[in-house]
Image (spheres, helix red, strand yellow):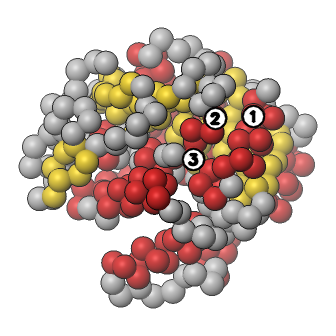
Amino acid sequence: MSHQSSTPGKHDSRPPTSPGKGFHDGGRFFFACDYAPVTERGFKGAGEVNLWVETEGTGPPLLLLHGGPDFDHRAFHPGMSVLASKRRLIYVDLRGRCMSRTRQPVGLDRDVHDVAAVLTTLGLEAVEVLGHSHGGYVAAAFAYAFPGRVRRLITVGTAWGEAPEEARARVLRAPSTGPARTLDEQRRLRDGLFFLKPPEKEARRHYDRCVEWLESPGALDFARQYAESGGAGPGETELKRTLCPVLLMAGDQDPFASVEKLRAAAGRMGPRFKVAAIAGSKHMPWIEQPQLFREAVESFLA
């Protein structure tokens, strides 16, 4: 792998240690991802920043873009491994998130160009791309800006076909929302929005580590900067102008993305757009229904 970044984030007491160890942020130590099936991990150059990249499996490359915008790739472990028997999975911490912290400016446009740069560094001209939630907007913006580099596009839990205010109002109406006075209450509310049944064992461990960083000073500072960058996410118009086949996926009980709205949007955009509803899941169907998720993804990519 290429050299690691020597530029710590604003709240760092020192830069990341060697791959596999972790980093200090706001006086706390955060462990790097230790997911065992990953075969390669480290920093890859992406223009003015270095991004943390991991790979798993063999076959055609499938780039995985995490949600948030302030989550990181660990939320994909271990559920996405159901795809690794037929695909080379490429996990990335996007600019400013977790291991890819930086003092450089952040925002959606920079995410798009970082994705292009890191794929070039990996020697990949064109890939299939899966983006979760906000990562779906990054994936769609990348497909729009670099149409020849995306063979097929999948968004999971991304709200298409409705105004952002409408999607936010639906989340606020969800039974699991409400005032949270403590950190534990915030975590329980988040669990209620993301899952019908909270994850267990290995999925719980990786998700919790992701949430621990999400609540750190560095992550909060990143979220503020990202919001202030002013880059509006792509809408249905930009999504329609992508050139590749597109699958719009969501859990059938996802409060963040309405399956009904996705089907209406796909109907307006034409036969190149498909919709998959994953029964018995909310915002992270690869955790709650990994086999149904795998079948939907493999059917589309086949």
In the drawing, what numbered circle is on residue 298?
1
Is residue 268 in view? yes
- Pointer 3: what residue? 79
Horizontal side, residue 50 vs residue 123: left or right: left
Q: Give the residue drawn at x 22%, y 43%.
A: 22
Horizontal side, residue 54 vs residue 153: left or right: left
Which of these two is toward me, 173 or 31? 31
Q: Amino acid at mark 2?
A: Leu
Instruction: Identify the image quadrant of residue 34.
Output: top left
Q: Give the residue drawn at x 58%, y 42%.
A: 80
Classed neighbour count for the residue bearing mark 1: other residues with Cα under 10 Å, few (<14), some (14–19), many (≥20): few
Instruction: Identify the image quadrant of residue 1.
Output: top left
Disc 2, SS: helix
Horizontal side, residue 172 vs residue 66: left or right: right
Where 250 falls versus 143 (above or below)? below
Q: Residue furthest front?
A: 201
* N-term-proximal mark, 2 vs 1: 2
Instruction: Identify the image quadrant of residue 219.
Output: bottom left
Q: Amino acid at mark 1?
A: Glu
Which of these two is toward me, 221 or 43? 43
Q: Give the residue drawn at x 81%, y 35%.
A: 299
Decide: marks 2, 1 in contact (CB < 8 A)?
A: yes
Horizontal side, residue 170 vs residue 261: left or right: left
Picture coordinates of residue 272, whole percent (x, y): 85, 34
- Pointer 2: what residue? 83
